[in-house]
Amino acid sequence: ILNVEQSPQSLHVQEGDSTNFTCSFPSSNFYALHWYRWETAKSPEALFVMTLNGDEKKKGRISATLNTKEGYSYLYIKGSQPEDSATYLCAFENQGGKLIFGQGTELSVKP
Amino acid sequence: EAGVAQSPRYKIIEKRQSVAFWCNPISGHATLYWYQQILGQGPKLLIQFQNNGVVDDSQLPKDRFSAERLKGVDSTLKIQPAKLEDSAVYLCASTYGTGSYEQYFGPGTRLTVT
C-alpha cells in the first residue's frame, strides 16, 4: 500500500503571509505528481502536473517544486489572500496511471 | 467547454436504503473515474472506466457498490444497501487519456447515511 502524506493537516494564516505545504510520496514507480485546489462546495481544480525531478511550476502567486529522488513536493503561496482559502490536495500518479491522493492541507486565510 | 456534471449534489438516506449517483463527463473524455472521499481523508479511487470498459475496480466494495458506463459517456454509481460508513463525498472525474493528464472533477455528491 502506497502512502502519500501531506503536512500540515491545517494552516491558519493572515492575509499577506506567505506559506508552504509539503507532500511526500514513494520514490519508486513514479510517473507524475499532481496538485489540486478544492474550495468548499466546488469541484477540485488542477493546479499543476509535474513529471521531472527538479521541476518547478508557477501560476500567479502559487508555485510548486518536485524532488522525485527523495519523494517530496512543496507548494508555495506568496502573499496569501482570503480567496486562497481551500483544501490543497496532492496526488501521486504511478506508472499504471492511478492517482493516490494525500489527505490534504486545509488553508484558512483571515483578512 | 462544459465541466463534469454530477447529480444530485446532496443526498441523505437511512442505512440499508439504496442510492444512485449520476455523472456526465466532459465531451470527448474517454476515461472516467469515481472516487470516494471520506471526511479527513484524501479521495480514494473506486472504479476507472476507459470508454465503456472497466480498467480498475480493485477498491470497489462489490458486495454493495456497482457502477456502469453503458454507452461510454454517462456513468452511474449505485450503493445497495448503504451503510453508515458510506457517508462521504463521491467525486466523478474525467480525462482525455491516462498518463500525466489532468483529471477534471465534478462538484461531487455529498452522501449522508443515518
Image: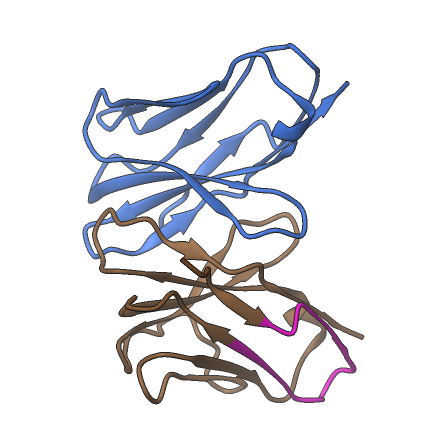
Q: Is residue A97 left or right of residue B59?
A: left
Q: Quadrant of residue A19?
A: top right
Q: Quadrant of the C terminus of chain A?
A: top right
The number of numbered discs placed on residues in the rendered structure image is 0
Expressed as whole percent of the image width and height from the top left, the position of residue B114 reads 80, 75
Q: Is residue B78 left or right of residue A58?
A: right
Residue at (58% x, 27% y) in the render:
A8
Residue at (71% x, 89% y) in the render:
B17
Give, as a single range, the part of the protein colored magenta: B7-22
Q: Quadrant of residue A25?
A: top left
Expressed as whole percent of the image width and height from the top left, the position of residue A78 reads 52, 13
Judging by colour alone, the chain drawn in blue in this rendered image is A
Residue closer to the observer: A103 or A20: A20
Judging by colour alone, the chain drawn in brown in this rendered image is B
Which colour scheme appears in the figure?
Answer: by chain
Does residue A62 appear in this view? yes
Q: Is residue B31 left or right of residue A74?
A: left
Residue closer to the observer: A49 or B26: B26
Expressed as whole percent of the image width and height from the top left, the position of residue B99 reads 21, 52
Residue at (26% x, 40% y) in the render:
A32
Q: Which residue sits furthest front?
A: B1
Vertical relation: B85 (above or below) A75 = below
Residue at (49% x, 74% y) in the render:
B23
Residue B20 within the magenta-colored segment of the rendering: yes
Vertical relation: B35 (above or below) B60 = above
Vertical relation: B35 (above or below) A95 = below
Residue closer to the observer: B57 or B90: B90
Expressed as whole percent of the image width and height from the top left, the position of residue B103 reads 36, 53
